[in-house]
Image (cartoon, rainbow, N blue to C red):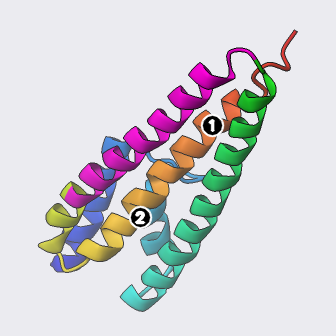
Amino acid sequence: MKLRYALSLAAALAASVGAGAEEPGGTLAECTKRHSDAAQWATCIRLAQRQASDDMLDAFATTQQRVRALGGVDGELAAALTESQRDFERYVQGQCTFVHAVFSRAGIGDLAALACETDLLLQRTAVLRSFADIGTRK
């Protein structure tokens, strides 16, 4: 019963955060679909989170370098980029705290919160990459 509840919550979570994983359903749904037990889910989610975090940090650094290369408007753009990153981190904390609370009833609050963070990191990476060529467009 708890597993069925957790999986139905995973589907709701994926819809609420816009998925974000390579395939529809989000990280939690993907890992629970691919693996049969909670230990494997945890490993899958941790690996996905680590990769998503590395990718987001790389995308942020690339965007930050491009912003600095613009010169004259650098200060305003750099400040806006830094502020947007802080805002993103606060959003992740709030959203994933909520997800943790919801999934705690199914006994997988920590895993669901980590999957939430992963999905949001994937979304942030896509946004940052879309701005990475800033100043190079003609």
The kind of residue tagged 2 is Ala
Q: Are marks 1 and 2 in contact (CB under 8 Å)?
A: no
For the N terminus, give its image quadrant. bottom left
Left/right placement of residue 97 relative to residue 91 reads: left
| Front residue (pair 108, 135) | 135
Name the spot of residue 111 as percent of width and height, x first.
34, 74
Q: Residue at left 79%, top 19%?
A: 135
In three-dimensional space, the C-alpha distance between marks 1 and 2, rounded to whole angstroms, equals 20 Å
Q: Residue at left 77%, top 21%?
A: 71
Q: Is residue 57 above or below residue 47?
A: above
Q: Is residue 107 above or below residue 118?
A: below
Q: Residue at left 48%, top 73%?
A: 45
Residue at label 2?
115
Residue range highlighted in magenta: 72-97
Name the spot of residue 91 as percent of width and height, x first.
33, 44
Which mark, by number, is residue 128?
A: 1
Name the spot of residue 18 as percent of width and height, x first.
41, 41
Secondary structure type for disc 2 = helix
Q: Residue at left 68%, top 28%?
A: 131
The secondary structure that most of the magenta stretch takes on is helix
Left/right placement of residue 63 relative to residue 75 reads: right
